[in-house]
Amino acid sequence: MSTLDLRPLSIGELLDRTFSLYRRHFILFVGISQLLVLALQLVQIVLTPAQVAVARPAASEFQGASPILAAGGAVGIFMLAIAAIVVYLVAYLFSQGGTVYAVSELYLGRTTTIGQSLSRMRGELLSLFGVVFLNGLVTGLCFLLLVIPGIYMACRLCVCIPAALLENLGPRESLERSFGLTKDNAGRAFLIFLLYVVILYAAIFLVDIPIGIGAQSAAHDPAMLRVWTALMQIGNFVAGVLVTPILTIASSIFYFDLRVRKEAFDLQLMMNPLGGGVPAPRSATTLLS
């Protein structure tokens, strides 16, 4: 490998490679994550005029205007909200998938660009949505039982997205693949999640402190208070966008590390250097085992 060698990693080495990869290719990963920012801006542009339009009929209803007009406006804003959710979800899926593909290329010693990473998501959108939805459903049901089973399941399924994209697996197969790969490694996955949460809230905290001070100073000025509140929301969102790639990069590197440990992926790659991500044999481990 030109930059990173494939070998079993300790949790410290895995995290170090995560931050090194993110730091050296910061523009690449932030560029992919900017899809979320662009989607949010598009949603705001679409929804703001619609909110104003629906507010006017609602206000005039008390002045004798037709309730049907207000109801029609409410339906319109609801449909636009659904469209906004779809736009944001598509951007999220492209961002996640593009980041996984970028990590795969860079970690295996090749080069890639934002366009090349995102272009590999063509035809994978519905499958990745199924993976994310099923992952959220299984983890959510486990959280309903008790918090600890939910955390454990999240750790066992943490590499389902890299498995789905790099091995071309369906939603159920990718979850079973992740469950098999992470056997006896849930603790390492938990440390990855824990570090991500700490960094995320630290970034949000650093953003909220100065803005909170400004908002406190403008407590008697409603107009400025709204400005500071909007800045806080934007700052928290941007902090989340900047930190989110860390979890995806770490999960992708963790996926490769598990394959090296359990399947000698490094030897497979040496024997087939042009094959890229060599599909691994399907694991017999299931979610119910």
Image (spheres, helix red, strand yellow):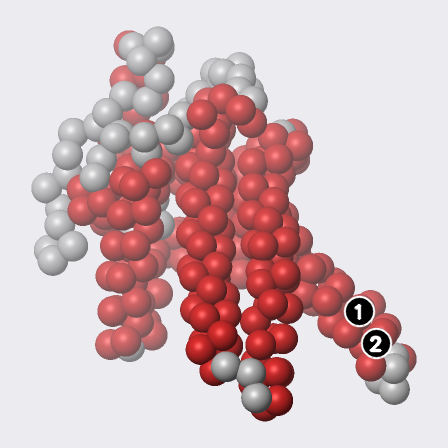
Q: Which amino acid does label 2 sit on?
A: Ala
Q: How crowded is mark 1: few (under 14 residues within 10 Å), some or many (20 or more)?
A: few
Answer yes or no: is residue 42 visible.
Answer: yes
Secondary element type, mark 1: helix
Residue 207 is tagged as: none
Residue 227 is tagged as: 1
Q: How crowded is mark 2: few (under 14 residues within 10 Å), some or many (20 or more)?
A: few
Q: What residue type is labelled 1?
A: Val
Q: Position of residue 240 (x, y in %)?
A: 60, 55
Q: Give the quadrant of residue 253.
A: top left
Residue at the spot 16% in from the left edge and 29% down from the top edge: 281
Q: Where is residue 164 in the image (x, y as percent from the top left)?
A: 28, 37
Secondary element type, mark 2: helix
Kindly indicate whether the residue at mark 2 contacts the one at mark 1 (C-beta within 8 angstroms). yes
The residue closer to the viewer here, 279 or 83, is: 83
Residue at the spot 48% in from the left edge and 27% down from the top edge: 117
Q: Label 2: which residue?
A: 223
Residue at the spot 50% in from the left edge and 66% down from the top edge: 77
Residue at the spot 11% in from the left edge and 58% down from the top edge: 288
Give the CA distance from mark 1 to mark 2.
7 Å
Q: Quadrant where the C terminus lies?
A: bottom left
